Image (spheres, coloured by chain):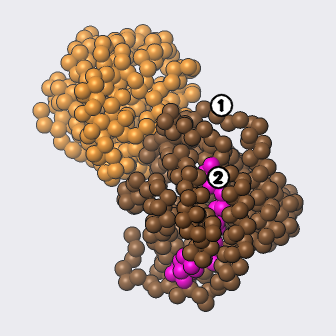
Amino acid sequence: MKVMVFYLMPYADLDQGIKDKYRSAWIVLPNTYFDPVKGHALYNRYLDELELCDELGFDGVCVNEHHQTAYGMMPSPVVTASALARSIKKGRIAILGNAFCLRENPLTLAEEHAMIDVITGGRLISGFVRGVGSEYFSLGQNPVYSLERHQEAHDLVVRAWTEPGPFAFEGKHYHFEYVNLWPRPFQQPHPPIWCPSMGSRETIEWAAHPHRKYVYLQNFSPRVAVGKYLNLYREIAQRQYGYEAASDRIGYGAPVYLAATDQQAIDEARPHIESLFNVFLPKFSEMMFYPPGYMSPESLLNVMQLKKANAGGVKIEALIERGIIFCGSPETVRAQITEAHADLGFQEFLCMLQFGSMPAELSVKNIRLFASEVLPALQGLNVGDYRGFELPKQAAE
Amino acid sequence: MPFQSQTIEINGSKLAFQRGGKGEPLLFLHGTEGLSQRPQFLDDLAAKYDVIAPDHPGYGQSPTPEWMDDVSDLAYTYLDLMKALDLRAAHIVGHSLGGWIALEMAVRSQERIGDLTLLAPAGIHVKGQQKADIFMIDPDEQARLAYADDKLGAAAAEEANAVKYQDIAIRERIASARFGWKPRFYNPRLGRWLHRIEVPALLIWGDSDRIFPPAYGPAFQALIPGAELVTLKNCGHLPHVEKRLETLAAMQTFMTR
């Protein structure tokens, strides 16, 4: 299994009292709460920690994109990936992801990803996402066209990466007379494309399509949802497309926190993981996360049903119980992830080793403990340790 | 007066509409709340007029054609509908999104239009006059904001909350976003062509409209030649529901002049 570290880069110094004054840390929270001096320290701390992970043998570092929020300070993950392009010496740099479809011209991102790929000698992973629902408020694009634009932007970018230019791209949402990318990407035919998702069936069907077979990544979800959607990828591959999905196409990401004992881990992680869920994550409204047309009516109903079951899960005990986070002694967490792998067979694992308000002393301790006590065991897991996929008799919804 | 549900094919796409009453033709164009519940207002109008009330594509029983993208497409669709039904000198009554459609129709062709009644129409933007972002707030909050009267608002909010994840409510929100997301409920080019409107126009606005601020009334009046503006007291974004009798009275004066 390959194990990468995933940072959201939250504004960890956020005044936790905002939760009593504002409905959300997204969009409506005034940016006067952002102190650039503290921001300077935080960015550099996070970059240092990711570089430490590279030195300690992780298979790569991951960054992502969110706008107008204290939840993550990376409106442009290209900037963070670029800042890491020369300091990450061994591992991959994964942008998980960039919302190409939110841009008026996705070719600017295609160019930037190609640059990073060439600079790093082919260590870029390029995540294609539609952005969470709130990005359609912060960047203004119409969510009704999100899926169409996502697929069209993807076609444009892949053609730009792979086809000799110049050529004209003639789409519904994007029409460019001249496509002729300089530089072309280092990796051939193009950097690996990953699809992080919250479990929309449309995304899974699209990612699993035989022309693509992209890595599907389920992040930050209750264990039951992770199992459901990772298996749905395998099921769709087999039932709909007639091939067996390889386990290296399956990715799983979760917050992980380690300490000497289970209780110490819980005590240390508690304020920070609870701040993530109770302060950084809450949305202004249900519609802010699921704006109209962002998902098909069927997917929306599925998601809302799962969400109902999740309501109230804001204590660390519940987060552990529901398998949203791994938290405990190295032995406990190693056993839990090993068992999850035996059950679901993901060959890519992403651990979020800093979250919410967690300060550097704890995140660095967490990184070092993970690297010495858990990482080698996980990297040793391979497809033979997976119990295997059994196609359910009845098609999943 | 009973209404009948009918469908017609316009430009290759099925359009559902209700039709009831006898008299001069009156085309009612609904707002984002759709026509799942036919307002009493339409039954009242059907006592005097031949009322035709379509479900816009994506709402109610009308599917969304592949090619349909924006309010311009809706305007041409309804001009085609008027031709197909051979409506002449029709009264057009449009609420909110429907008022915007009516205006887009009128700047294109007034050949079959007798007059325009515009109930808190969308369609233009006045700098500094923010509309409520109905996509950011949840359906219950939107329903509450639509009324000036708190009790009516609370009842509407409860109802909206109960049905918000029903298939039709989800589909109608998608349709509203298709037409009104970017930019929010207006066409930057509409204002400069409203001078083309030569038929009589009546604007009705609630003085307590928290969805589209009442300041939009005078702004439209300044752009539409000869338009009259009636402001209703203690009325929100649904004049034809919250102040039905006053709305009907103002329309009666206007339409029979």
As shown in the figure, which amino acid type bears the numbered disc 2? Met
Give chain B's shade: orange
**Quarter of the figure with residue B158:** top left
Q: Give the residue displayed 23% in from the left and 22% down from the top.
A: B244
Within 10 Å of disc 1 (Cα), the crowding (few <14, some 14-19, many 20+) is: few
The residue tagged with tag 1: helix, strand or loop?
A: helix
Q: Give the residue displayed 36% in from the left and 80% down from the top.
A: A394
Camera-near label (2 vs 1) is 2
Q: Answer yes or no: is residue A346 visible.
A: no
User: Is residue A114 toward the left or the right of residue A236 in the image?
Assistant: right
Instruction: Pick the quarter of the image with the C terminus of chain A.
Output: bottom left
Residue B68 place in picture, x, y as percent: 47, 46
View extreme (left): residue:
B1
What is the CA distance from the residue labelled 2 to the residue labelled 1? 21 Å
User: Is residue A234 toward the left or the right of residue A359 in the image?
Assistant: left
Chain of the residue where label 2 is placed in the rendered structure? A
Tag 2 residue: A358
Region in magenta: A334-357
The residue tagged with tag 2: helix, strand or loop?
A: loop
Residue B99 place in picture, x, y as percent: 39, 27
Mark 2 or mark 1, which has the lower sequence index? Answer: 1
Q: Give the residue displayed 80% in from the left and 56% down from the top.
A: A48
Give chain A's shade: brown
Question: Residue A32: which numbered mark, if any?
Answer: 1
Q: Is residue A218 above or below residue A250?
A: above
Q: Given contact means CB atoms under 8 Å apart, are the residues at marks 2 and 1 in contact?
A: no
- A345 falls in the magenta region: yes
Q: Nearer the viewer, residue B103 or A253?
A: A253
- A364 falls in the magenta region: no
Chain of the residue where label 1 is placed in the rendered structure? A
